Amino acid sequence: MLDSARNERRRVVMISDFQASGMSQTDSGFMLAPGVGFQGVDVGGGGVRNLTFTDVRSPDQLLEGVTDYEILARVRSTGTVHVDNAEVTLLINGEPVASEAVTLDRTSEAVVNLPVSFEEGGRYAGELRLNGDDFDADNTHFFTVNVLPRIRVLVVNGAPSANWFDDGAHWFTLALDADGNSPFSAETVLASELGTVAFADYDVVVLLNVAALSDSQAAQLDTYVLSGGNLWLAPGSRVEPAVFNRQLGDVAPARLAEAVDLGRNDYLLVADMDRRHPLIAPLDVDWNARFRGFWQTEPHSDTDILMYFDNGLPALLERPVGEGRVLMFASAMDLSWSNLPLQGLYLPFVHESVNYLAKATDIVRAYRVGRGVDLAHELGAGVDTLEVTGPGGNVVAVSAGNSVYPATRPGFLQVGDPELGSLYAINSDPLATDFSRVQVSDLHDRFINPETTPMASERVRTAQLIAELEQPQRLWWWVLLLVMLLLLLETLVANRTYR
């Protein structure tokens, strides 16, 4: 528009409150064309006292029995007028449980730790509220906490030993509850004792070097997995591939082909893994374990391979089966085939594997205003439509074809029944209520081209353009004159030499 403008004085006038968070720094190299001016008109008004939560650390899920916890909140003065003092109040299910004074006299930010107890299982709605400023829209932060029962693990010991050092179940259960404050509740049984065990009572079933099951036990295990149970298989030297494939081949991630024992002078290492997988990602450690024995496997077409040995064969395999999930480690979890139990990675590997099986899908329950809340996972078998109550009390229906709820205001999003349904927290973006401002003079210096004169009229710009065009022409005149002088001089010298 300015390129074709006829006005002598060309300029951009920007009318704004010049909020810093609204001024993107990604185009900091932008500059107006020569001759174009810039004028900022500040309509921001007077000073604003504002406090906001820039960060809140609260648990999405806790295990039953964790009674003492702390909610961490980072409070910042984001107005144009500094706020020295404030108060933060923690509410659980609408009831205040803790309060803390905040002092910001020397800094613009402070961290508050608020103690809270979750003694019983269930779903909790949490709120953090700020007092002490002039802007209420960002004074509440919403969060949810699901307190879950401990993860129940059944460990089936297929190779018991009187010497605990050689007992794989000993190492496995020790890793599950090493410090006595574990999120897991483990029970160990022998394979011969499975007749009295109900698999449905456990979140995860682990078979450690189990040679064989009865046909009825194998059928019960199939039903358990298909209906949503989780199974971890770690076959060792006692397992017969023909028996394993017949009893567990339909649910296992792979069929067993042949057991390989490399002897004492040779071993394999874990060479490659899917580091983006939710089971592997937290294991930011080097795998130095040496595997002398392992199983050659034949993975099913729907199996994912999470780890490989350095000979290219699968080490850790995963397969969804019905509503459940099955992991298989292609070696023993004891010392008979490897030194894995003696490695520091053994404990986190066991924890992350069992935790992943018990909670195979991590559901995000905290969103920001402006995002869409995807509720597709809430629509299970036989559920085509759900009623969703937004933060403002409006009720809408979501279905498989339209499962995204647009988050337009902060508060709680209730899905389904108020007592049994799911709860999601929606909060505003802290940057949106950061009222710190950019100086107009800074923008002027950033945008104005150095070649711009403050009052360059059209006549002056035309004269400058003519001068720029004539400058090369004047140079050519001097070059032409010099050539003519050289020609004349050459003629005179030639004539004298000829005579």
Image (cartoon, helix red, strand yellow):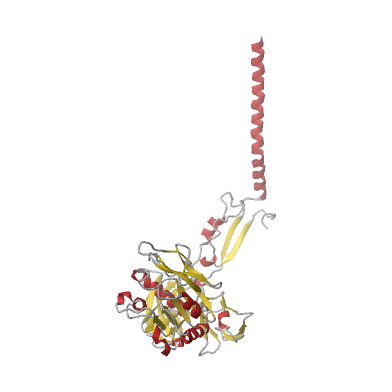
Residue 127: name its quadrant: bottom left
Work out which quarter of the rendered image holds the C terminus and state it: top right
Question: What x and y, as percent, mark residue 1?
Answer: 68, 58
| Residue 361 in sight in this render | no
Residue sitting at x 66%, y 41%: 469
Q: Is residue 290 left or right of residue 393?
A: left
| Residue 471 in sight in this render | yes
Question: What x and y, as percent, mark residue 350?
Answer: 40, 74
Q: Residue furthest left?
A: 163
Q: How many discs mark residues in the rendered view? A: 0
Residue sitting at x 52%, y 71%: 299
Query: Vertically, is 488 above or below 306?
Result: above
In depth, the one of 423 and 448 nearer the eye is 423
In depth, the one of 478 and 305 nearer the eye is 305
In depth, the one of 289 and 452 nearer the eye is 289
Residue 464: name its quadrant: top right
Question: What x and y, as percent, mark residue 150?
Answer: 40, 84
Question: What x and y, as percent, mark residue 228?
Answer: 51, 83
In depth, the one of 483 and 388 nearer the eye is 388
Q: Residue furthest top?
A: 499
Q: Is residue 364 left or right of residue 474?
A: left
Q: Is residue 483 left or right of residue 360?
A: right
